[in-house]
Image: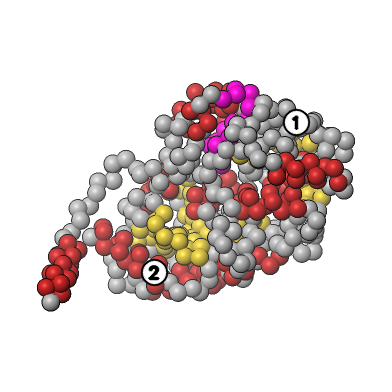
Amino acid sequence: MKQVCVLILSCFLLAACHQKKAPIEPLNKELSDLSIYHLPSAWSTHNNETIQLKSLRGKVVVVVMIYTSCKAACPRLIADMKNVFEQLKNEPQEKLQMLLVSIDPKTDTPEHLYEFAKENKMLNPPWLFLRSSESNTREFAAALAVNYKQITPMDFSHSNIISVFNQEGELVHQQEGLTVNNISTVNKIRLLLKKVH
Amino acid sequence: MAFIEGGSYAPLYRNDENNTKETVGDFYMDKSAVTNSAFSLFLEQFPQWKKENIKSIFAESNYLSHWENEFEADAPVTNVSWFVAKKYCESQQKRLPTMAEWEYVALADQNQKDARSEPSHNQYILDWYESPKARSPKKVKSTFKNKWNVFDIHGLIWEWTYDFNSVLISGESRKDVKTDRNLFCGSGSVDANDLMNYAAFIRYAFRGSIKANYCIQNLGFRCVKDLK
């Protein structure tokens, strides 16, 4: 009985901790050693703006690497991303970034990405499409441990991995495979979003 | 640097079901791997890649760990990550070789540009893969010079390639799972070609098992350059 009381009590204590708002950490503190934002590369968005990766700092970033002319796994990967997002509709949106990075920068010009985003109703935040040079893309994929190779001028093989980065750009979760159960991915993102608020 | 005249060959993993050839253009390749002394000059110029400054996303803690003890200045630098190897080559206006380029040069022995049919050549490579590795590699140019005038392509160290992370043998080669085609878009088309080329299998398996920030005792690199 005593044990049960302790258990219940500790549950209350834990709940109390959760309610306490974590202070928003200043963004000018030094980046963690494992942060993806150490990659200095410049990227173009589907709106043809040039951004540095580190401008995403402070957001929870959910990333897949795709190419828009892909007919096989990418539509399913994008469906997986949309499915993750559906479940996050009630979460605070301003700190969430759903990011799609092209592994085919030659074909996927900003104009091309814009068309693709429009077609898939992904023009507005939290959706964001990025492309950069071949070399920057290779580095980005290397940091995510995403493998890819060009098979023909039109087609690529690539890992189907959804990666989740925390506000500091540290890789905290990866979901591998297509149409897998994404509960743990969604829960991880929810938990991270709570940290901001 | 050595001039490598481009050509085509059938790689272990073909790219396209209709085309079993891999074609590489002309390029120059460093005759030997980058040495410890050359690498330390680079670090003087770009101190952000020194062990005390580097971020762990770019290199794990093993980075340059052999420098803590005595080491041979003219031996190839090892315990370096892919990120830093790439930056080194870029600092020299060069680049890392692609896997296709590296494998193309690695086909050669002393006398032929494609020595795959030479049993003694394959045996030499496999014997080297089998032998226990010395704590630190010997000096560069201490093994054979191949037909392209490139030294030590086999027999001294393993080398990074630019697109090492394009190996898609199984879904997640780093995990102990059977091939899962669902993890890769199009992976069905990258089945092996030359089932006898066991040495190449070992290299592909190795590349498929590493990550870009890994620093490994017998893994170094050399650079290549495009023709102007």
**Residue wearing tag 2:** A184
Q: How many numbered marks, from 0 up?
A: 2
The residue drawn where x is 46% and y is 69% is A81
From the viewer's perspective, is the residue at label 1 or at label 2 nearer? 1
**Residue wearing tag 1:** B143
In the figure, residue B159 lies in which quadrant?
top right
Q: Amino acid at mark 1?
A: Thr
Q: Where A4 sits versus B53, above or below?
A: below
Quadrant location of the N terminus of chain B?
top right
Q: Position of residue A88 (x, y in %)?
A: 34, 70
Q: A195 left or right of A183?
A: left
The segment highlighted magenta reads: B71-90
Quadrant location of the C terminus of chain B?
top right
Whether residue A40 is visible, yes or no, is no
Q: Amino acid at mark 2?
A: Ser
The residue drawn where x is 39% and y is 51% is A170
Q: Nearer the viewer, residue B176 or B34?
A: B176
